[in-house]
Image: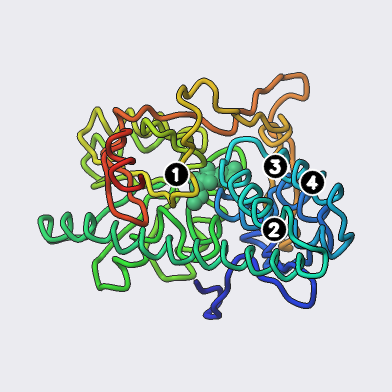
Amino acid sequence: MKIEGKTYRTIWFENNTVKIIDQTKLPHQFLIKDLKNVKDAINAIKTMEVRGAPLIGATAAYGLVLSLIEKNDLSFLKKSSEDLISSRPTAINLKWAVDRMMKKLLGVNDKDILKIALDEAKSIVEEDINYCKSIGLNGLKIIKDIADKKKDTVNILTHCNAGWLATIDWGTATSPIYHAHQNGIKVHVWVDETRPRNQGANLTSYELNEEKISNTVITDNAGGILMQRGQVDMCIVGTDRTLSNGDVCNKVGTYLKALAAKDNNVPFYVALPSSTIDWEIKNHKKIPIEERNPEELSHIEGVDENNNIKKIRIYPQKSRSLNLAFDVTPAKLVTGLITEKGICEASEKGLKGLFK
Ligand code: MRU
């Protein structure tokens, strides 16, 4: 998608280096950063220079390529794969991508291994782009139906950033929105700010602005009243891990939006590529929920009058804080799952009908 009219992807490989857009600086600075070794890739995932489930999966895949460039050695590769998987716990795409790479690489001879690794990382990237595009075309039908009935702008609420910045291109939750816009359907997006890291305000609003899609940032708590007022036609969010029973783990606060949507008869959709489905865990209590540094809550970042990025503390130094990064929305609150293969019910029957 576009930034200042120029088309970008979030990650690419050039001259033995992985290039990323440093998302910790957006929207105030647009910086392309080089990842030169596997440590850089792990650090980029941990510090959220790259974030969003599909993008951290792709970064991990390229991280293994960087590991091989650094040292073509099996025990180093295995250690790299373990370190990459543990760099963030919740998004299943990370383990999915590393496992897929390692399956391809184990048993391959030293001479060919780098080329095979690079080809596989590239195919993970290309596949994600195609899947996100298909998610968009499938989700477009839902938006079009609402637009046809309403004969007015369709108001869509989203949480966090499940946009192209969270994937390689198109995004998951935003892909139906981009496709609707490109098909001449009038859409407006309510963007949850998404405390504490403000992925909604900093990233979703930014990428929608760049694509000239009407959007309004709201506090995380405003969704309920907008739904009561009839100002939300549908919600679309992304996910970091969807269980085979249809329970959806996503950015903390998603669950509360789904509850409000249910109470107000607002359709609540989750968009995901199949790489985000966890076929193994059966109980949502077993999902590892990331707990991040409390400083993300007690401090906030923005720009001063000279456009310098500043970080300030916003509540008493003595106050304790708990920074849970994800929550789980039970399947019963989800209207449907929008996947690359079509739309299904959030249930084992629905998912297996599409994928197995
Ligand atoms: O902590 P983040 O910013 O990595 O969380 C991202 C989300 O919660 C997204 O909704 C999810 O990864 C889906 S991205 C297509």
In the drawing, does residue 150 fall left or right of residue 108? left
Whole-percent x, y for residue 235 in the image = 32, 45
In the drawing, does residue 280 fall left or right of residue 58? left
Q: Of circles 3 and 1, which is in front? A: 3
Chain-order first, disc 4 or disc 3:
4
Q: Dot 3 corresponds to which residue?
A: 85
Front-most of residues 274 and 305: 274
Q: Dot 2 corresponds to which residue?
A: 25
Quarter-of-image position of residue 134: bottom left
Whole-percent x, y for residue 158 in the image = 40, 47
- CA–CA distance between discs 3 and 2? 24 Å
Q: Dot 1 corresponds to which residue?
A: 159
The three-letter code of the residue at mark 3 reads Ile
Q: Dot 4 corresponds to which residue?
A: 78
Chain-order first, disc 1 or disc 2:
2
Per the image, label 3 sits on a secondary structure element best described as helix
How many marks the image carries: the answer is 4
The three-letter code of the residue at mark 4 reads Lys
User: Counting other residues with Cα less than 10 Å from the Cα at mark 4, is it few (<14), some (14-19), or many (20 or more)?
Assistant: some
The three-letter code of the residue at mark 2 reads Lys
Rendered residue at 31%/51% (across/down): 156
- CA–CA distance between discs 1 and 2? 20 Å
Chain-order first, disc 3 or disc 2:
2
Rendered residue at 70%/64% (across/down): 117
Front-most of residues 187 and 120: 120
